[in-house]
């Protein structure tokens, strides 16, 4: 004897994951592209607490000066002798962008002024100093 079951084949009950995967890939591409525009100096600095009238949004070069008066550019420590070469290279890659100096609270003003002087000699303009707003 044959078993007869009157089960209807389920049609159209599968979940199509293709649109969801498309959205995930689009989001992944978006995050990869936007992450490349975020500039980080590579070291955490304690900024001076202050208030300012206007903020500077167009950053081409970001230089950090630590409490030990070390220079950091693109997540790498840069010696004083190589500072001008690195800033020149970055300026040639993006001549329209300005420069922001992130100076630590404990850094010497001479170290910050040295970066600003080198930037002025190269032709980088404007040069801004990043501070922590209240």
Image (spheres, rainbow, N blue to C red):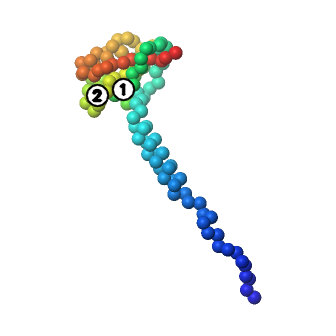
Residue 21 percent across, percent down from the top left: 51, 53
Q: What secondary structure is found at the residue carrying circle 1?
A: loop
Q: Name the residue under label 2.
A: 96
- The answer, for residue 82, to whether it is visible in the render is no
Q: Which residue is drawn at 29% across and 26% down?
A: 87
Q: What secondary structure is found at the residue carrying circle 2?
A: loop
Q: Which of marks 1 and 2 is nearer the N terminus?
A: 1
Q: Is residue 88 above or below residue 68?
A: below
Residue 35 percent across, percent down from the top left: 43, 37
Measured Cα–Cα span from mark 1 to mark 2: 9 Å
Q: Nearer the viewer, residue 3 or 54?
A: 54
Number of numbered callouts drawn: 2
Q: Which of 4 and 125 is in front in this view?
A: 4
Q: Name the residue under label 1.
A: 58
Q: Which residue is drawn at 65% across and 73% down?
A: 9
Q: Which of 130 and 65 is in front in this view?
A: 130
Residue 103 percent across, percent down from the top left: 41, 17
Residue 64 percent across, percent down from the top left: 40, 22
Mark 2 packing: few (<14 Cα in 10 Å), some, or many (20+)? few
Q: Is residue 10 left or right of residue 26?
A: right
Q: Which residue is drawn at 42% across and 33% down?
A: 38
């Amino acid at each position: 004897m044959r078993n007869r079951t009157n089960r209807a084949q389920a049609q159209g009950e599968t979940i199509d994951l293709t649109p969801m995967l498309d959205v995930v890939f689009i989001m992944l591409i978006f995050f990869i592209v936007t992450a490349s525009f975020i500039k980080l100096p590579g070291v955490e600095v304690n900024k001076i607490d202050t208030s300012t009238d206007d903020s500077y949004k167009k950053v081409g070069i970001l230089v950090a000066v630590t409490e030990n008066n070390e220079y950091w550019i693109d997540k790498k420590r840069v010696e004083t002798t190589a500072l001008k070469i690195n800033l020149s290279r970055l300026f040639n890659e993006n001549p329209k962008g300005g420069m922001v100096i992130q100076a630590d609270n404990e850094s010497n003003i001479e170290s910050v002024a040295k970066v600003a002087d080198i930037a002025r000699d190269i032709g980088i303009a404007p040069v801004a100093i990043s501070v922590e707003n209240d």
